[in-house]
Amino acid sequence: MTAAPGVRRERAVYGASAVLLPFLPDGGVDQAGFEAHLRRTIDAGLVPAVNMDTGFGPVLTPAERTGFLEVARSTGAPFIAGAHVTDKPGDPVDLDAYAAAMVEVASFGGTPIVFPSHGLSAVDDDALVAAHRTLATQVDEYLGFELGPMFHPAGRIFSTEVFTEVLGIPQVTGLKHSSLRRDLEWERLAVRDRVRPGFRLMTGNDLAIDLVVHGSDYLLGLSTFDPEAFARRDAAWAAGDDATFWALNDVLQYLGRLAFRPPVPGYRHDAAMYLALRGLVGHDGTHPASPVRPAADRELLAQVAAELDELLDR
């Protein structure tokens, strides 16, 4: 049984946000809406992550991904970007394609994060570690990624042994953990603290965003709903302002429970609806491959927005 780690008070939280890619009524990308939301994320104080699942990275064309890298570079701010390999179940792992994708992200000034593929997820533990070591020879820095299959069919959660080995690769400076399980993340925090304390473990648990109080940082899809609320919550924790931290965390966690219910990828439609309700994007549509939420969600999302507006005095 894994025990919950202690609370780490007044800690500066590193917050990264997977930026939603909004769409227009005709099904095309809302380029202006994306650029505005990207800059809003940066202005709030979060590190943006583009071409992630929230930005429909797995279903974009290579040219589209490159275009969003260019937009991210144009901001002049640090950013993270998904490095993708498009394959099918049964295909072998293509490390050359991964290396090319990672080098491209780095060439635009971003930090690549290795997005799962069917080939990479199918190899055994030894080959998975070896793959990360091979990719480490291609770039100065990159992020690992454990993604549960509830998010993506090629998702894979590492064994503890694989996670520990990955910690020993100097170029892997952090890892996003998206199992939606507290106990696995607690275990990883304990391993991280023992093996490599400076390693950045970024929670992707949108159902337990309070994991930051135990020492996790984050790279979340939930934060794309309201980057300002997350940034204010994080600042309150660093300042020891428990009342503000928990008041914001409680509302944001309700939002996470609502938006990330099965089918989990439907959260992207909830994010689009939330941003449209606040007048921050012009339309609440998403990519045609994304699940659609019921219209009744709009009322619940509007209530959350009103609560956060009151707490943030905006």
Image (cartoon, rainbow, N blue to C red):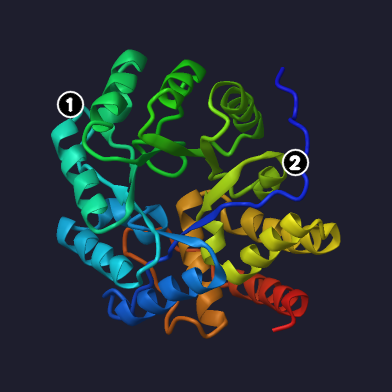
Residue 27 image position (x, y, % from top left): 28, 74
Residue drawn at (29%, 40%) of the image: 140
Q: In this picture, is 264 found above or below 87?
A: below
Q: Secondary structure at mark 1?
A: loop
The circle drawn on residue 92 is 1
- Image quadrant holding the C terminus, namely bottom right
Instruction: Identify the secondary structure beneath mark 2.
Output: loop
Q: Which residue is mark 2?
A: 8
- Tell me the amino acid under the disc marked 1: Pro
Is residue 108 found left or right of 184 in the rendered image? left
Report if residue 182 is visible in the image.
Answer: yes
Q: From the viewer's perspective, tell me whether residue 235 is left or right of residue 139.
A: right
Disc nearer the start of the sequence (1/2): 2
Q: Nearer the viewer, residue 107 or 211?
A: 107
Q: Could you tell me residue 47's position as x and y percent?
A: 47, 60
Residue 289 % position (x, y) = 32, 58
Q: Nearer the viewer, residue 82 or 201?
A: 201
Residue 313, compared with residue 20, is above or below; it is: below
